[in-house]
Amino acid sequence: MFKFLLEVNQRPEPFAEYTARELWTDPHTSKKMLAYHLNETVDAASRNHAFLDRSAEWIVSHFRLESGARVADFGCGPGLYAQRLATRGLDVTGIDFSANSLEYARKQASDAALSIEYIEADYLGFETDRRFDLVMMIMCDFCALGPEQRAVLLRKFRSMLADGGAVLLDVYSPHMFAAREESAAYARNLLDGFWAADEYFGFLNTFKYDEERLILDKYTIVERNRTRRVFNWLQCFTPAEIEMEFARCGLRVVERWGNVAGSHCDAGSTEFAVVARANDR
């Protein structure tokens, strides 16, 4: 037991494990995540619906996306952005590895008579010959990836841009890092049954890495017949750091916003959004 508790409270190396697939493909937790996505009142897995409406309207207007413009939505989940953009006449491709979320998204598109291409895939390995007027990745998904994964993704975005195309994504700021504290918690059925259908015991350890400006929420879930660990990484960026990462992958940041709904930057905000374009286009 002592050895187990040492392992529970052990601080791993930055980005030592990547467990997002397990979270989004597990039959139980993927249903719970979908419920968070669809909750209209909270900003959990997705932002609230009023923000989504405002954001979709801004995206179409700001990028001057006319009917038929091609949009790739990386980490599309249940299609909350994809459906809003398709309703405005855009040609949308959504990529996600949650079969449960995509099943919901496809049904919603069918019910609304919308033609949206949903692709079940890990976006880190996704390839296509299509070129897009806008490539977007929203809800700070970029921050869950390690440096090498981020570079892979940015080079992929660069290769998928049509002439004049843009990349839109949002990230956590240093204010998010400052707002979080290291902690340790334990509960029976941690998060009200989120992690398993049957009874379990859950540990949550939050670690901060000052040099990397990185946060880890490490979950250890003990069920009757298995123990598993889920790592939720949150990389926080300064605007200069984002510009450097993009530049190394052939992209230049041309705009910075307070969020993906076009708000102006707030000096104390916990996140911000950037627009980037290919260096040679």
Image (cartoon, grey):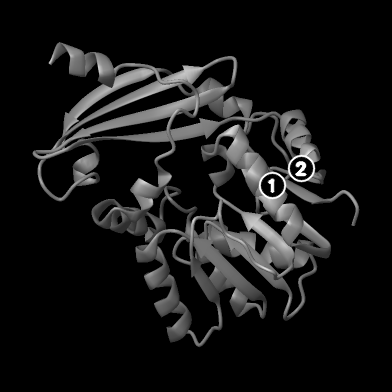
Q: Is residue 39 visible?
A: yes
- Identify the residue shown where x is 44% and y is 71%: 105
Q: Is residue 262 visible?
A: no
Q: Nearer the viewer, residue 251 or 107?
A: 251
Instruction: Give the quarter of the image for residue 171.
Output: top right
Q: Position of residue 93 (x, y in %)?
A: 59, 70
Circle 1 is placed at which residue position?
154
Circle 2 is placed at which residue position?
249
Give the CA distance from mark 2 to mark 1: 6 Å
Circle 1 residues within 10 Å: few <14, some 14–19, many ≥20:
many
CB within 8 Å, label 2 to label 1: yes
Instruction: Give the quarter of the image for residue 143.
Output: top right
- The amino acid on which the numbered mark 2 sits, given as a three-letter code, is Cys
- The amino acid on which the numbered mark 1 sits, given as a three-letter code, is Leu
- Identify the residue shown where x is 54% and y is 83%: 114
**Left or right of 229 on screen, residue 147:** right
Q: Position of residue 33 (x, y in %)?
A: 35, 53
**Left or right of 87 on screen, residue 120:** left
- Identify the residue shown where x is 72% and y is 39%: 265
